[in-house]
Amino acid sequence: MMLPVIAAIFSSPMPGLSSPSVRYERVGDVAVIRLDDGKVNVLSHAVLAALQEGLDRAEEEAKAVVMIGRPGKFTAGFDLTVMQAGPESARKLFRSGMELFLRLYELPIPVVAACTGHALAAGAIWLMCCDVRIGADVTAKIGLNETAIGMVMPSSVVALARDRLSARHAQSSVLLARLYSPRHATDVGFLDWVVAAADLEQAALAEAAGLAEGLALNAFAGTRRVVRGPVAQSIRETLDQDTRSFAVGLS
């Protein structure tokens, strides 16, 4: 598939990020936020803070966002060293993650996810909160595996799954911890389509650039509030209880 060439009109690193694993650049009207820790792209407190900082800048200077992982791994989810440090540690990380995901779900500019590979647990939640999800056609697993690793699925995550996943697959994804290949994940609703891995970044940039140019952002933001506001409000109403009851059955 031939893709349009997107020229980097402006590109620079963002100084002072909370994690060196997260990089920011601007490509025309598109903010590109990259996560690459050289391993499996776990979501730690520092990474979550850096992603928030990237979104701060994107809201100030861009009209769309691309979020991209490292080759083969979008993210393995929350940092297990933090999750296994005790219930309170796990709750704090869960809350920080959900605050990021809820922000993405309501962001006033469109968000395109370039899913480079594995997207497990919190990684799958991240995908559900983006507007357009393009996956690399690689061998990878995508899905909510919480019940397979001893976790009760929080109500806030269930609300997102009901909103963004196919009705045919939502319950099996949440209850049965089904994991899907990128191609199958398009049917389930974690992804919208897949492309060859070599074309993924360019496809995501082209999609985001088209949205930046084609959408009236004030109307987009207002319509987003209409479409997603009720679900977002329900998540806010349950998030405190979800956080208090959050537990991990990992040893």
Image (spheres, rainbow, N blue to C red):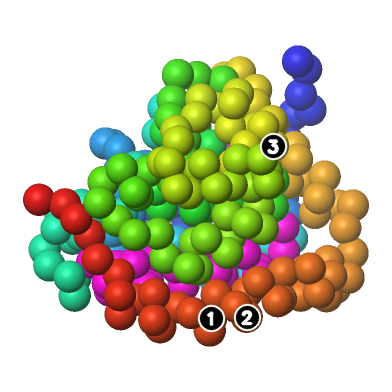
Would residue 220 appear left or right of 158 to someone viewing this image?
A: right
- Identify the residue under disc 1: 236
Q: Residue at x 11, y 63 (%)?
A: 85
- Identify the residue under disc 3: 192
**Amino acid on which disc 3 is placed:** Asp
Res 242 → quadrant: bottom left
* Marks 1, 3: nearer the viewer: 1
Q: Residue at x 45, y 61 (%)?
A: 51
Q: Secondary structure at mark 3?
A: loop
How packed mark 3 is, by other alpha carbons closer than 10 Å (few <14, some 14-19, many 20 or more), is some
Image quarter of the N terminus: top right
* Marks 2, 3: nearer the viewer: 2
Task: Tell me the magenta residue range.
Answer: 90-114
Q: Is residue 98 magenta?
A: yes
Cα distance, mark 2 to mark 3?
25 Å
Above or below: residue 38 compared with residue 2: below
Q: Position of residue 246 (x, y in %)?
A: 30, 70
- Identify the residue under disc 2: 233
Nearest to N terminus: mark 1 or mark 3: 3
How packed mark 1 is, by other alpha carbons closer than 10 Å (few <14, some 14-19, many 20 or more), is some
Q: Position of residue 78 (x, y in %)?
A: 31, 54
Above or below: residue 234 compared with residue 181: below
Cα distance, mark 2 to mark 1?
5 Å
Would residue 204 appear left or right of 102 to someone viewing this image?
A: right
How packed mark 2 is, by other alpha carbons closer than 10 Å (few <14, some 14-19, many 20 or more), is few
Outermost residue toward the top in this view: 1
Please tell me which residue lies in front, 244 or 140: 244
Please tell me which residue lies in front, 49 or 143: 143
Cα distance, mark 1 to mark 3?
26 Å
**Amino acid on which disc 1 is placed:** Arg
